[in-house]
Image (cartoon, rainbow, N blue to C red):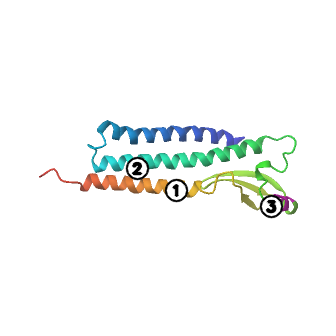
Amino acid sequence: MDHFLLLVPLVLIGLIAVFGFVGYGCGTLGRIGLRQADRETWLRSCAALLCAAAAATYIWGLLGVTGAVVEAEDGGTDSAPIRSCRTPGWQEREATAGIIDYTVDYVPLRFVCETSDGGSYATDAAPGYVNPAALGFALAALGVGAAARWSRQHGPSDSA
């Protein structure tokens, strides 16, 4: 239950961040105008939209992990081994080293099942593309944000 109490606020904060970044990126260009915006404004707006894409991608994976946690915490009939851990090959893992618990890793995002022999394996609760895509969008946002800063410092001089 501890993971669920952390996952729900993370999803909500992430959604607020997505809308904030999209609002900043689109609002700045809308306020100034597409044709009147200079290079720095375009780059800052693009960086904000890339941040929104990174956050939205991470939230998508977070929703999958949250669903796996809810299913794992459900209990009741047919709850052992943990239903979220029943991935291909789970019968062999259960026969050799019982599936006893789970954890959630937030970076990289994944739902991890633990076995009684000290081993563990990640499930596909967070789609495989989530971590690389979120990292790619975040790195692109950093690069574009750095370019915007560089453009401000080394842009056309006012002494014409």
Are dots 1 and 3 in contact, CB under 8 Å? no
Q: Amino acid at mark 2?
A: Ala
User: Are the two marked residues, 2 and 3, in contact with CB atoms closer than 8 angstroms?
Assistant: no
**Disc on the earlier residue, 1 or 2:** 2
Asked if the stretch drawn in magenta spans residue 42, the answer is: no
**Residue contact between numbered discs 1 and 2, judged by CB atoms under 8 Å:** no
In the rendered image, residue 93 lying in the magenta stretch gets the answer: yes
Number of residues whose C-alpha sits closer than 10 Å to that of mark 2, classed few (under 14), some (14–19) or many (20 or more)? many
Q: Which residue is mark 3?
A: 89
How far apart are the two marked residues, 1 and 3, measured between alpha carbons? 29 Å
* Callout 1: SS: helix
Q: Rate crowding at label 3 as few (under 14), some (14 to 19) or many (20 or more) other CA atoms within 10 Å.
A: few
SS at circle 2: helix
- Of the residues under marks 2 and 3, which one precedes in the sequence? 2
| For marks 1 and 3 on the same chain, the one whose residue lies earlier in the sequence | 3
Q: Residue furthest left?
A: 160
Q: Which mark is residue 135?
A: 1
55 above or below 131? above
Gap in Å between the C-alphas at discs 2 and 3?
A: 42 Å
Residue range highlighted in magenta? 90-94
x%, y% of residue 3?
A: 68, 44
Q: Residue at x 36, y 55 (%)?
A: 146
Q: Which residue is mark 2?
A: 47
- The image shows residue 17 at horizontal and vertical percentages of 49, 40
Magenta-drawn stretch, dominant element (helix, strand or loop)? helix
Q: Which label number is shown at residue 63?
A: none
Residue 133 percent location from the top left of the image? 54, 55
Q: Amino acid at mark 1?
A: Leu
Q: Identify which residue is drawn at 59% across, 40% down.
A: 11
